[in-house]
Amino acid sequence: MDIREIAEGVKSQVGLMIEDGDELSPVLFAVSGEEVKIVGFELNEHVKEGWQVLLPTLLHRFDAAAYIMVVEAWRSIQLAEDSPLTKRLESGELRVSQLPQDDKEEVVQMLVVENGKSFQCWCAKIKSIADRRFITGWEEPPEAIKIAGRMIVSEW
């Protein structure tokens, strides 16, 4: 099963879920041959702290060659490189979710990872108008934006 075809299907389903007003819980799609195993998570601090062990364990158990992870998240809105907020974010002292509303935006992030081979990320902004949510088009972040963090596992 082609991971890119699955990713395109996931993108369209995520858009429909957001438009239906559903809160998007983190979802893992583990791909092994022709099978796709789907696991939903409540992404609390305990899960986040243990993610670097939990995710590889699940991927091994499912004999996954690739995975797709979809999460709702906050993304900072292009803070200046020398901004005090930028320095606090980079040091881990501050999280994006703690930024003032004008300095962040709500997004859906989708990671597509093939074990030890490739890594791609797409983001779509979540907009709200008159209590109705929808996503903008999916985009890959520019090369200049570093995609990293404890939630990304690229080899297992």
Image (cartoon, rainbow, N blue to C red):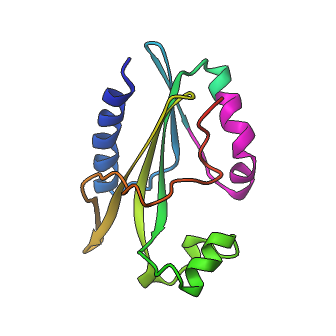
Residue positioned 49% across, 51% down in the render:
71
The image shows residue 101 at horizontal and vertical percentages of 45, 82
Residue positioned 43% across, 52% down in the render:
109
The image shows residue 85 at horizontal and vertical percentages of 57, 82
Q: Quadrant of residue 125?
A: bottom left
In the displayed structure, would residue 21 be above or below residue 56?
Answer: below
The image shows residue 77 at horizontal and vertical percentages of 41, 74
* Magenta span: chief secondary structure: helix
The image shows residue 72 at horizontal and vertical percentages of 47, 56
Is residue 138 a member of the stretch shown in magenta?
no
Depth check: give the residue in front, 117 or 111.
Answer: 117
In the displayed structure, would residue 81 be above or below residue 12?
Answer: below
Residue positioned 62% across, 70% down in the render:
90
Q: Quadrant of residue 106?
A: bottom left
Residue positioned 39% across, 26% down in the render:
3
Depth check: give the residue in front, 145 or 73.
Answer: 145
Depth check: give the residue in front, 94 or 118.
Answer: 118
Q: In what quadrant of the picture does the N terminus appear?
A: top left
In the displayed structure, would residue 151 be above or below residue 67?
Answer: below
Q: Which residues are magenta?
A: 40-58
Is residue 57 a member of the stretch shown in magenta?
yes
Q: In what quadrant of the picture does the C terminus appear?
A: top right
Left or right placement of residue 122 versus residue 19 in this view? right
